[in-house]
Image: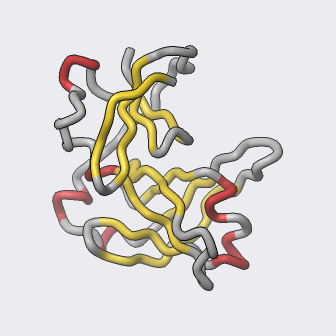
Amino acid sequence: MTHFTIAGALVIEAKPLNLARPTDDSLRIYAVDIWQDPPQSWGFGRGVYLGKGMVLTAAHVVGSAADTKPRVHIAGMELPATAIREGNSQRVDLTLLSVDEQKLPVYLQMRRMPLGDNKPWPGEPVVVAIPEGTALDHW
């Protein structure tokens, strides 16, 4: 089973490896940038658009959403985000954000990225996707 990963932090089940070539940019649509207000000194973080206005990211990217006021950059738009579930970097380093799905283009409103049931294993092939491109790697 091949997985999709955002900057090595999040793993999502994706298409078989033979379809996920470094030149295959079909997964880029799910990759988002996440900014804080005020902006982080190191720049932005990354996340993955799951569909239905939901964005999954690492908790350390957002911190406390009440304090950082995260914004999701997707499809050339910047949307304010609300934390649905917040983790922390010491326990579960995942945070689920929500953006107003109605403000997204129709082609994104129809997209869904299902989460995989299987845990990745060391050395497993993954697709690393950021808004700028994709590449093959190993978990």
The outermost residue toward the bottom is 38
Q: Tell me if residue 28 comes above or below residue 106 in the rendering.
A: above
Q: Position of residue 49 (x, y in %)?
A: 39, 53
Total labels drawn: 0
Q: How is the image coloured?
A: secondary structure
Left or right, 98 with reference to 137: right
The outermost residue toward the front is 42
The outermost residue toward the right is 90
Q: Tell me if residue 138 comes above or below residue 87 in the rendering.
A: above
Q: Residue at x 80, y 42 (%)?
A: 91
The N terminus lies in quadrant:
top left
Q: Tell me if residue 59 comes above or below residue 129 in the rendering.
A: below
Q: Position of residue 62 (x, y in %)?
A: 64, 64
Left or right, 34 with reference to 58: left
Q: Residue at x 82, y 45 (%)?
A: 90
Q: Tell me if residue 37 comes above or below residue 107 in the rendering.
A: below
Q: Residue at x 27, y 72 (%)?
A: 76
Left or right, 132 with reference to 64: left
Looking at the rendering, which quadrant does residue 24 occupy?
top left
Q: Position of residue 105 (x, y in %)?
A: 20, 68
